[in-house]
Amino acid sequence: MACATPWTRRTADVSTEKTLLDVNNLNVHFQTPEGELQAVRDVSFCLRPGETLGVVGESGSGKSQTMLAMMGLLANNARAEGQVLFRGENILNVPAAQLNRVRGPKLAMIFQDPMSSLNPFLTVERQMTEVLQIHQNTSRGQARAASLQMLEKLRIADPLRCLNSYPHQFSGGMRQRIMIAMALLSQPDVLIADEPTTALDVTVQAQIVALLRQLQQDHGTSIIMVTHDLGLVAGLSDQVMVMYGGRVMEHALADDIFYHTRHPYTRALLESVPRIEQADDALLAIPGMPPSLRSMPPGCPFAPRCARADHNCLVPAPLSLATDGAAAHRVACHHTGSTA
């Protein structure tokens, strides 16, 4: 498991406290009319207090399903296997009443689609105050004051009017900020952010990132940042996990991911990021399409799109230490030595 080798933060010392969140061999299966599909395969990672894990990969790589499984929010036709240990207690597949002691007050999530996550029939105030009233047993007045203060921290104009309004009265970006405010209200130990800045302009994105950093500084909150934005990952994450086809392709410190890339897929992702110095006709893209869960290729899921693929890639590569023995750098590839 990755936590056997301590991660090192680039910005500050991580708490020496034992692992906060430990995910072991997580698998997610879906029952469909065409048969069973596996969306997540043997995903393992861990998080200590104050760390940020960036999870990147193309759409359909299993990032969101991994997070939903951890939160006990999978669809009815899905099942999860493995372990999700929060402070040593396995919370995977436990009854809702037991999970709710952790989900919300200790383990919170910012969802990708705020419109489907907010109740259209309740005011923002009712939805925000409910978080504190249920999980922290605060009075309605105290919860309202805390909600107002959080909206002010997020630089929402006229927060009082915001509290008295309904979700449909706001833009997508404003609804996203309301979702973020709700998740931060209980000051969770672990915050899962699934594309939290997708609908926001760059100025508001910077404000959200600054708020998340402040939350870590003040409360030692651990963050899992699920995103397509490699720039966001580079600026906020301590460790990065790259997923493709439901598997972990590479997992290492952020600096190693960006400067000592080992997996061809990670390298392809980085090369596809537009750069100012590039000409318009020099934009690079990964050839081909991500695999369908109904027809996964044998062996490495990235092999059909990989220029380095050969007969060895018909067998899945284990997620193992890089060939040079780099600390805490794990790669699932038969050709790690040639990608450095």
Image (cartoon, rainbow, N blue to C red):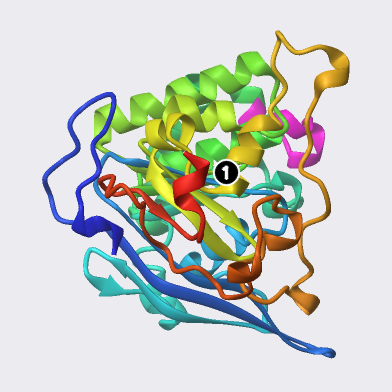
Q: Is residue 174 above or below residue 76?
A: above
Q: Is 309 on the left-hand or right-hand side of 252?
A: right
164 within the magenta span: yes
Disc 1 crowd rating (10 Å Cα; few below 14, some 14-19, many 20+) is many
- For mark 1, what is the residue? 266
Q: Where does the image place residue 68, in percent across and percent down from the top left?
A: 56, 64
Q: Is residue 181 visible from the viewing direction of this image?
A: yes
- Secondary structure under the numbered disc 1 in the rendered image: helix
Which quadrant would the N terminus be assigned to in this image? bottom left
264 within the magenta span: no
**Picture residue at 71% right of the left edge, 50% below the top:** 307
Task: Tell me the magenta residue range.
Answer: 162-173
**Picture residue at 42% right of the left edge, 40% below the top:** 185
* Front residue of 66 and 159: 66
Q: Is residue 326 above or below residue 178?
A: below
Q: Is 39 on the left-hand or right-hand side of 261?
A: right
Q: Disc 1 marks which amino acid?
A: Thr
Q: Where does the image place residue 127, in percent across and percent down from the top left?
A: 58, 48
